[in-house]
Image: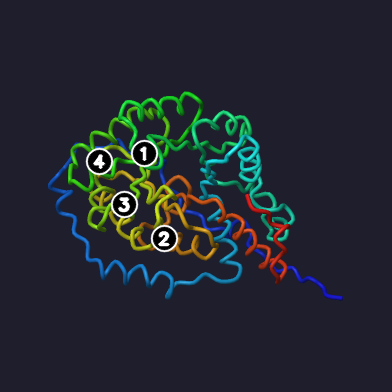
């Protein structure tokens, strides 16, 4: 007969917490500064070296790893964006958002009273009312993808109507996609005007601007597009739709978070960052948290300024937490997929 030894887990005070800060003032945007945009230059080899060091020189182990994984959970935009989504799927997703980790694991970790929950639930517009009802009283916001997601090829007026409808339905966050053609043709004024109009349509709902970085051709385009979107009032800039052949990569992340740092240093306004697509392992979530801490600081270690767009990630995090507690990996049916 084998016995299970429960390990000492992180207490709530060990869970990575950002340093006390004043409330974040929402980025109001600014006039388009083309001189600043054209100043952007990217040293690709240096970016690649920096991204490589994140996964080879930085590690988080034992109870600190468990604590950082709990932090990662609070930053997840738990997502389902499939063609076969149904109200039942969304109801299960919302239940998982409310209780992302089994209570027995939380108790064993010493954080049973932490009120752990994800950052948001991200879905298509037509299922927003279902999610709103399922999450009532939880303070978990509903995020709706909009503006012709994922390709962004819908007529402009239709894109505005999509945003308006999602906000009216109760979505507190809107994930918009930019017209990639504006970037590829260097029409920065058109990109600025588009994103600024989207921001106006969002009203009080926070706007996450998806760049679809794999489709922007170069890292310099990624850097310039990041700046233009922030100038137009983006609350977050986001790597990908999750539908491109290549989605969130650390190389792109380095470029985007440094654009965020530059924007903050020059304007004083903090903009959030959301990598999305292909983030499936607990180890990857730690890599992204390390990137945020080292490049932007502790203020970007909370879900007010950092989100992970993912669907399957939560299952692997729960699996790793189970291993930390019991010393072995639980069978799949103990940690069902979202």
**What is the crowding at mark 3: few (fewer than 14 residues within 10 Å), some, or many (at least 20)?**
some
Is residue 144 shown left or right of residue 115? left
Q: Which residue is mark 3?
A: 215
* Mark 2 residue element: helix
* Mark 4 residue element: helix
The front one of 229 and 163 is: 163
Q: Residue furthest front?
A: 84
In whole angstroms, how far apart are the C-alphas of marks 1 and 2?
20 Å
In whole angstroms, how far apart are the C-alphas of marks 4 and 2?
24 Å
Q: Earlier in the sequence, mark 1 or mark 4?
A: 1
Q: Which residue is mark 2?
A: 293
Q: Earlier in the sequence, mark 3 or mark 2?
A: 3
Q: Which dot marks residue 333?
A: none
Q: Which dot marks residue 231?
A: 4
Image coordinates of residue 301 in percent, x first then y, are 46, 54
Q: Earlier in the sequence, mark 1 or mark 3?
A: 1
Q: Which residue is mark 1?
A: 25
Give the label, 3 or 2, closer to the camera.
Answer: 3
Q: Earlier in the sequence, mark 4 or mark 2?
A: 4
Q: Earlier in the sequence, mark 3 or mark 4?
A: 3
| The quarter of the displayed image where residue 128 is located | top right
The front one of 59 and 278 is: 278
* Mark 3 residue element: helix
Q: Residue furthest left?
A: 35
**What is the crowding at mark 1: few (fewer than 14 residues within 10 Å), some, or many (at least 20)?**
few
Give the label, 1 or 3, closer to the camera.
Answer: 3
In whole angstroms, how far apart are the C-alphas of marks 1 and 4?
15 Å
* Mark 1 residue element: loop
Is residue 320 shown left or right of residue 243? right
């Amino acid at each position: 007969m084998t016995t299970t030894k429960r390990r000492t887990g992180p207490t709530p005070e060990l869970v990575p917490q950002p340093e006390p800060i004043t409330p974040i003032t929402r980025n109001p945007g600014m006039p388009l500064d083309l001189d600043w945009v054209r100043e952007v230059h990217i040293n690709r080899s240096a970016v690649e070296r920096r991204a490589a060091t994140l996964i080879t020189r930085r590690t988080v182990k034992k109870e600190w790893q468990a604590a950082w994984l709990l932090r990662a959970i609070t930053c997840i935009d738990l997502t389902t964006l499939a063609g076969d989504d149904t109200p039942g799927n969304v109801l299960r997703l919302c239940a998982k958002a409310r209780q992302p980790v089994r209570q027995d694991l939380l108790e064993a970790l010493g954080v049973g009273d932490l009120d752990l929950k994800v950052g948001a639930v991200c879905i298509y517009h037509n299922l927003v009312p279902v999610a709103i009802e399922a999450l009532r009283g939880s303070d978990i916001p509903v995020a709706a993808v909009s503006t012709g997601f994922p390709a962004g090829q819908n007529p402009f007026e239709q894109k505005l109507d999509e945003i308006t409808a999602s906000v009216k339905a109760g979505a507190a966050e809107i994930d918009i996609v930019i017209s990639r053609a504006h970037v590829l043709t260097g029409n920065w004024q058109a990109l600025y005007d588009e994103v600024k109009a989207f921001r106006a349509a969002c009203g009080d709902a926070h706007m996450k601007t998806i760049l679809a970085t794999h489709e922007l051709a170069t890292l310099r385009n990624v850097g310039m597009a990041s700046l233009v979107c922030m100038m137009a009032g983006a609350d977050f800039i986001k790597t990908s739709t999750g539908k491109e052949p290549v989605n969130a990569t650390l190389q792109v992340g380095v470029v985007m978070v440094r654009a965020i740092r530059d924007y903050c240093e020059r304007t004083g306004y903090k903009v959030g960052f959301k990598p999305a697509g292909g983030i499936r392992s607990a180890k990857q979530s730690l890599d992204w948290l390390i990137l945020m801490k080292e490049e932007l600081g502790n203020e970007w270690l909370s879900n007010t300024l950092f989100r992970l767009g993912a669907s399957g990630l939560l299952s692997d995090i729960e699996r790793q937490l189970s291993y930390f507690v019991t010393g072995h990996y639980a069978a799949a049916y103990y940690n069902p997929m979202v």
